[in-house]
């Protein structure tokens, strides 16, 4: 007798839209925040806010001379990580880290690496480039957000094996940022994206994240508890407590604040993230990737994607990740 065809719900199909939503979502959030990185809240407001700046016809980027829609190092490093995951034939940590090292070095040497890259990322990759093992290349005690802002692709690759997700995200962090806080932050971004692909309840994000990262880093866990206390505050007050996003724990907590505060509304969340002092592009990029993993790319406003640099290739990259890692 022929086997009965399983209903779609039992096949656990992963919608391609969510993979595309994650990659385009993080890149568009980054492109929105990049022109206002390093500006204070009042300076951003004086110029009409990040969304106005991004969409206006006389666009200018405060941080660089790049045109509208240009993303920063956050998306570049996320692409490097995605390419490494695609090139790795197995999920063995040493093989994956070999490819991550190679892709990071390619990024380091690229003429397009002119988008305010983080000093710890650069120093770590410089060490990889001169032959250092990934376990030793990271800058000691580095806690900046460079390790966290690039791990969304790890969530797409290992959404179905959270132990592996943790192992690879931690290793990817250590290669440039040798601290438990950076490890926890890198794991957190990958995990929050994986939750979207896994169709987990968005409202449980913070609780689940606290459990998933428990015991890795006291300061990271403390930051999540601080975040809990800010959810009934307005952004300006909340970010005073959470921090400006330069550190990995601050960037993840700030992004999750925006995501939860706006109830996973893409536009509201990335604008809230970008409109803040500090690392606007990283916080908006992390928030955009997390929301994209839950809602898919069709829910991202077209206006945010219209001028996005390299959009068609980002789309193709997401399709490749889906083809390779869907279960
Ligand atoms: Mg950046």
Image (tube, grey):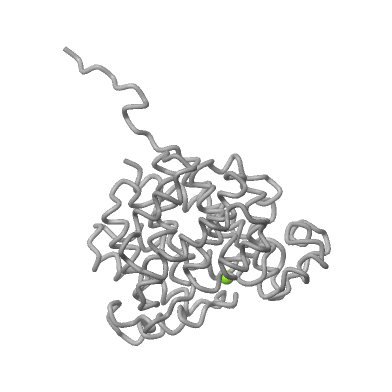
Q: Compared with residue 173, is residue 224 higher up or lower down, i.e. above or below?
A: above
Residue under the image location 46 percent in, 46 percent down: 19
Where does the C terminus fall, quadrant-wise? top left
Asked if residue 254 shows in the view, the reply is yes
Residue at far left of view: 1
Residue 77 percent across, percent down from the top left: 48, 68
Residue 25 percent across, percent down from the top left: 56, 52
If the picture is divided into quarters, which one holds ligand 1?
A: bottom right
Residue under the image location 74 percent in, 60 percent down: 54
Give the total number of marks visible in the rendering: 0
Q: Compared with residue 247, is residue 294 higher up or lower down, i.e. above or below?
A: above
Asked if residue 185 shows in the view, the reply is no
Question: Is 152 in front, or is 217?
Answer: 217
Where does the N terminus fall, quadrant-wise? top left
Q: Compared with residue 121, is residue 231 higher up or lower down, i.e. above or below?
A: above
Question: Is 61 in front, or is 179?
Answer: 179
Q: Compared with residue 113, is residue 275 higher up or lower down, i.e. above or below?
A: above
Residue under the image location 36 percent in, 52 percent down: 157
Q: Is residue 244 left or right of residue 216?
A: right
Can you tell which quarter of the image residue 94 is in? Answer: bottom left
Can you tell which quarter of the image residue 35 is in? Answer: bottom right
Q: In this view, does 162 lie to the left or right of 195?
A: left
Question: Is 235 in front, or is 65?
Answer: 235
Q: In this view, does 100 lie to the left or right of 265?
A: left
Residue at far top of view: 1
Residue 115 percent across, percent down from the top left: 60, 75
Residue under the image location 30 percent in, 64 percent down: 215
Residue 303 percent across, percent down from the top left: 71, 48
């Amino acid at each position: 007798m022929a086997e009965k065809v399983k209903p779609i719900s039992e096949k656990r199909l992963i919608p391609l839209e969510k993979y595309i939503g994650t990659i385009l979502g993080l890149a568009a959030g980054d492109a929105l925040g990049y022109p206002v990185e390093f500006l204070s809240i009042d300076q951003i407001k004086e110029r009409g806010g990040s969304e106005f700046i991004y969409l206006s016809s006389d666009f200018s980027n405060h941080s660089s001379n790049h045109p509208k829609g240009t993303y920063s190092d956050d998306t570049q490093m996320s692409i490097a990580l995605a390419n490494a995951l695609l090139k790795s034939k197995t999920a063995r940590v040493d093989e994956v880290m070999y490819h991550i090292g190679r892709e990071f070095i390619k990024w380091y040497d690229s003429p397009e690496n002119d988008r305010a890259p983080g000093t710890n990322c650069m120093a770590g990759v410089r060490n990889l480039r001169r032959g250092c093992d990934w376990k030793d290349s990271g800058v000691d005690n580095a806690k900046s957000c460079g390790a966290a802002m690039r791990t969304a692709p790890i969530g797409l690759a290992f959404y179905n094996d959270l132990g592996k997700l943790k192992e690879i995200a931690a290793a990817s962090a250590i290669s440039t940022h040798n601290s438990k806080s950076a490890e926890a932050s890198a794991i957190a971004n990958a995990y929050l994206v994986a939750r979207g692909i896994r169709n987990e309840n968005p409202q449980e994000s913070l609780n689940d994240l606290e459990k998933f990262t428990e015991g890795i880093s006291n300061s990271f866990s403390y930051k999540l508890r601080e975040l809990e206390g800010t959810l009934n505050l307005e952004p300006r007050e909340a970010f005073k407590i959470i921090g400006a996003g330069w550190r990995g724990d601050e960037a993840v907590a700030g992004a999750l604040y925006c995501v939860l505060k706006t109830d996973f509304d893409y536009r509201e969340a990335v604008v809230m993230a970008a409109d803040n002092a500090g690392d606007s592009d990283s916080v908006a990029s992390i928030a955009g990737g997390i929301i994209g993993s839950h809602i898919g790319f069709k829910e991202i406003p077209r206006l945010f994607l219209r001028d996005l640099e390299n959009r068609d290739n980002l789309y193709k990259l997401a399709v490749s990740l889906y083809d390779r890692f869907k279960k």
